[in-house]
């Protein structure tokens, strides 16, 4: 009995550092989903400064700010993908939802002054959705744990 007691004293206390799985409540994920869809609508469907020339829809390298636009499109759709990932939507489902939302946004932009709908935007928005879903599932559903210190 004394040997067992001595061994337990030599080991560090388990309660000092323990591991907790990352969890998020589904209502928070739904709130993030609503917030991201509203943000996408506001940021992409409001009129911008009217430009005379619209590049063709299928052009992937047209425009002055191609790299900047691509980066911002990916960034804009990451929260949507993260919300879908937190709600345990599979990657293919999240990609499809991002694709269809992005396609709807791009089609609606045809009637909005100053907006330039493009296939490049659909592609980068879909990539952002997939990336967000991957991040959420990697950190919240993979069984990984975060070290919690009391």
Image: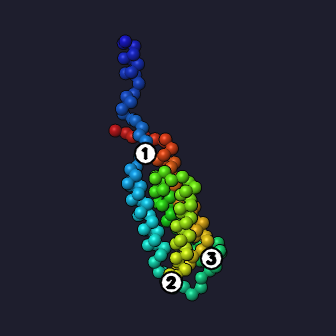
**Whole-percent x and y of residue 83?**
46, 57
Q: Camera-side residue: 105 or 73?
A: 105
* Secondary structure state at the residue bearing disc 2: loop
Marks 1 and 2: CB-CB under 8 Å?
Answer: no
Instruction: Name the residue at the bottom extreme.
Output: 52
- The residue at 43%/45% (across/down) is 22
First of labels 1, 2 by sequence position: 1
Q: Which mark is residue 113?
A: 2
- Nearer to us of marks 1 and 3 is 3
Measure how far apart labels 1 and 3 are at the Cα level: 41 Å
Mark sitting on residue 148: none
Q: Residue at x 48, y 46 (%)?
A: 141
User: Residue 64: which quarter of the image?
Assistant: bottom right
**In the rendered view, how is the structure colored?**
rainbow
Pick whichever, 16 or 139, lies toward us.
139
The CA distance from mark 1 to mark 2 is 44 Å
Quick check: 53 above or below 108?
below
Mark toward the start of the polypeptide (1 vs 3): 1
Q: Is residue 23 left or right of residue 127?
A: left
Point out which mark residue 57 bears: 3
Q: CA distance from mark 2 to mark 3?
A: 15 Å
Q: Nearer the viewer, residue 38 or 132?
A: 38
Can the viewer see residue 73?
no
- Residue to which mark 1 is pinned: 22
First along the sequence among labels 2 and 3: 3
Percent x, y of residue 101:
52, 67
Q: Residues within 10 Å of mark 1 (few under 14, many from 20)?
A: some
Q: Secondary structure at mark 1?
A: loop
């Amino acid at each position: 009995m004394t040997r067992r007691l001595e061994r337990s004293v030599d080991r560090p206390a388990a309660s000092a550092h323990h591991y907790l799985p990352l969890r998020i409540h589904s209502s928070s994920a739904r709130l993030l989903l609503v917030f991201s869809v509203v943000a996408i609508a506001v940021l992409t469907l409001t009129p911008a400064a009217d430009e005379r020339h619209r590049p063709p829809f299928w052009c992937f390298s047209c425009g002055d700010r191609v790299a900047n636009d691509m980066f911002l499109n990916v960034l804009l759709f990451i929260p949507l993908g993260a919300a879908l990932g937190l709600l345990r939507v599979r990657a293919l489902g999240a990609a499809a939802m991002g694709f269809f939302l992005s396609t709807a946004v791009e089609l609606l932009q045809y009637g909005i002054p100053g907006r330039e709908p493009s296939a490049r935007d659909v592609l980068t928005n879909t990539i952002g959705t997939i990336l967000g879903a991957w991040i959420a599932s990697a950190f919240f559903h993979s069984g990984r744990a975060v070290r919690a210190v009391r």
